[in-house]
Structures are given as C-alpha cells and as structure tokens.
Image (cartoon, grey):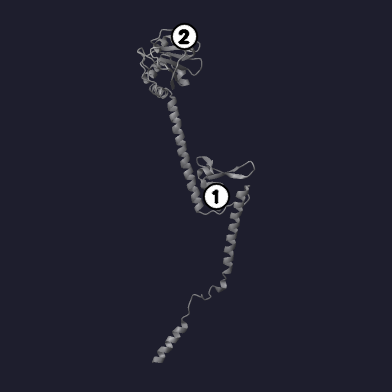
C-alpha cells in the first residue's frame, strides 16, 4: 500500500479527472452534496473563499493498495481503510469536507481523495510534511489490516542490501586472509601462487581485454560461488601489485601489455641472477680445503715448549 499527499490550488480540471464515472465509483464523502465535478468544485469553493491568504487550499491524496490486495478488497473494506488513512493523518472524517473516488479502469486499483484544507471557520488544515506523513499513515494502515506495505517492502530491500554488503565484506576478508597465507609461503611464480590459492578453494579467472591481453583476474570462492574482481577483494591482489611483489609468469600462458611484460621479465631475470650467484658461491667452496687451518686460529704449540724449557733450566 502506498500513500501520497500534496497541497495544491485545486482547479476544476483536477475534480474532472478524479470524479469520473467511466474510471470508477465513489466510495466515501463528507459535507458535500454535489453530484458532478463542477458542483463539487463550487461547493468546496464556498469554504475556500473564507480564507483569502492561502494559495493552496486543497489537499490531493492517493491511497493505492498493492495490486493483489486491491483485487481482493471489497468496497466496504476500501471505505474502511480510507477512513483509517485519513484518521492517521489527523483528519476529522466527521467535520472535514472531502470526497474519495475509487479508480478501477486499471488492474492496479487506487483511491483519489480531494480534501478541502479550509474549514467552516476559514482555518487551514496544517500540511507540513504531508507527503511523508501520508507514506507512514498508509504503512500503519497496511500493517493493521495485514496488507502489503510499500514502505515495508522498501525497508526489507534495504535490509537485504545491507546483508549482501556484509556477506560480501566477510567473503573479501576470508579470501584476503588466504592470499596472505599463500604469500607467506613465498611462491616464486604466478603459476605457483594460483595453484596454491586453488588448493584453498579460490579460483582465479583471467580477464582478457579486446587486444587479447591479460587485464587482470576475477576470483571465485568455490564453496559459495561468490565472485568479484581480485582488486575488489584487496588492492594487493590486483595483477600489477602481484607482479610488483616479485611474482612472474614462468611460462607464456598469457599475453601481457608492454608495462606488465617488462615487469614480468625483470622479475624473471632477477631470479635467474640470484640463482646464478648462489651457484657460483657454492662452486667456489672446494671440498679440498675443508680441513685447511683457518687464518683466525693461532697455534700455541711453540710457546708451550718454551715454557717447559724455562722450568727445566731453573731446576
């Protein structure tokens, strides 16, 4: 159910649109005798002329039940929810001047209400935030009568969105924690990194651009099938950041753009250089000199012999 309301000048064209026997039927009125739109308009005009200061002397309201509810509600039930809607807006249904007309020309049936803002003393009905008040009034009427409320639908949608956001946040956190554990094992190549992540049920799906180059990856959690960009999980999981960290593609599995290709080559060459230096260092350490005396070790044998000779000489 939706409730709408606004203050307006309230010309004859509005009455002519609302009060139309070809569109529907009248379900409720108060303090009005006229039958035709022009008669109703002129009758309300009598009270409105008592107040010469205001410009908007009419309130146009719409009460629109959900399509399914509208089809099942009887005329009497529609009359009752209209009264309840007006009372929720603090409108006195016994003293105020109004007419409620049900439009049935469409499947989505709805009620138009034309309410005179000016009472018999020339005073105005307060219309501050009347639009918002109408929304909440319709929501309360719907809840009371166990009808579908548009306001509640919106609230539920917001809650669903917040739940999805929270689930997504938790998923990103879990994936990133797995990424950190894999990086702690110091994988050397991208192939090794991707294989270790797959062992943790995180699959990397290549994203190829129009030039046929690897643009990045999407990650999919194989347990719940949640999927998103790797960089959306965490900026450190973006392709360029991974390459910046020292990882590289050992095999030419993907075509990379110039920048990433250069970075990939630098990382590969650096690793080869480190391996080469380590190999040279190991070869220079010959097994023949394992037992050679260290220059840091001092031989005290000769000094000991001199001390023994001095002792014998004294005797």
9 or 220, which is in the foreground? 9
Q: Quick one: SS at disc 2?
A: helix
Q: Is residue 160 above or below residue 281?
A: above
Residue placed furthest toward the right: 211
Q: Is residue 115 above or below residue 294?
A: above
Q: Residue at x 46, y 34 (%)?
A: 161
**Disc number placed over residue 38 in the picture, else none:** 2
For disc 1, the neighbor class at 10 Å (few under 14, some 14 to 19, many from 20) is some
In front: label 1 or label 2: 2
Q: Nearer the viewer, residue 144 or 269?
A: 269
Residue drawn at x 45%, y 33% as measured from the top left: 160
Where does the N terminus fall, quadrant-wise?
top left
Horizontal and vertical percent for residue 16?
A: 49, 12
**Could you say where residue 109 lies in the image, as x and y percent from the top left?**
48, 17
| Residue at numbered disc 1 | 242
Q: Is residue 233 left or right of residue 53?
A: right
Q: Position of residue 167 (x, y in %)?
A: 46, 39
Q: Residue furthest front?
A: 53
Query: Which element is circle 1 on?
Result: helix
Tell me residue 28's x, y (percent).
41, 12
N-term mark: 1 or 2:
2
Q: In the rendered view of the protein, which quadrant contains the C terminus?
A: bottom left
**Crowd class of label 2 (few under 14; some 14 to 19; many from 20; radius 10 Å):** some
Q: Is residue 273 above or below residue 123?
A: below
Q: Which mark is residue 255?
A: none
Q: CA distance from mark 1 to mark 2?
A: 76 Å
Query: Measured along the vertical axis of the image, is residue 266 above or below residue 46?
Result: below
């Amino acid at each position: 159910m939706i409730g709408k309301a606004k203050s307006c000048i309230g010309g004859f064209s509005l009455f002519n649109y609302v009060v139309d026997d070809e569109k529907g039927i009248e379900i409720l009125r108060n303090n009005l005798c006229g039958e035709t739109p022009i008669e109703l308009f002129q009758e309300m005009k009598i009270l409105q002329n008592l107040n010469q200061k205001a410009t908007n002397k009419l309130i146009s309201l719409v009460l629109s039940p959900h399509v399914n509810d509208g089809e099942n509600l009887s005329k009497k039930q529609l009359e009752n929810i209209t009264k309840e809607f007006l009372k929720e807006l603090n409108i006195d249904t016994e003293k105020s001047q109004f007419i409620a007309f049900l439009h049935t020309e469409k499947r989505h049936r709805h009620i138009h209400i034309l309410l005179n803002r000016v009472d018999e003393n020339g005073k105005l009905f307060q219309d501050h935030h009347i639009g918002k008040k109408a929304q909440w009034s319709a929501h309360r009427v719907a809840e009371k009568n166990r009808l579908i409320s548009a306001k509640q639908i919106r609230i539920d949608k917001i809650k669903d969105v917040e739940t999805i956001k929270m689930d997504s946040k938790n998923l990103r956190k879990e994936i990133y924690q797995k990424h950190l554990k894999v990086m702690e094992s110091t994988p050397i190549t991208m192939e090794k990194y991707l294989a270790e992540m797959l062992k943790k049920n995180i699959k990397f799906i290549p994203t190829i651009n129009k030039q046929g180059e690897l643009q990045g990856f999407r990650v999919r959690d194989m347990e719940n099938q949640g999927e998103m960009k790797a960089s959306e999980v965490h900026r450190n999981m973006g392709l360029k950041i991974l390459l910046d960290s020292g990882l590289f593609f050992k095999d030419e599995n993907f075509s990379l753009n110039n920048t990433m290709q250069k970075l990939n080559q630098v990382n590969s060459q650096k690793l080869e250089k480190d391996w080469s230096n380590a190999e040279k260092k190991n070869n220079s350490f010959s097994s023949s000199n394992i037992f050679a005396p260290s220059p840091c070790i001092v031989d005290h044998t000769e000094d000991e012999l001199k001390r023994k000779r001095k002792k014998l000489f004294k005797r």
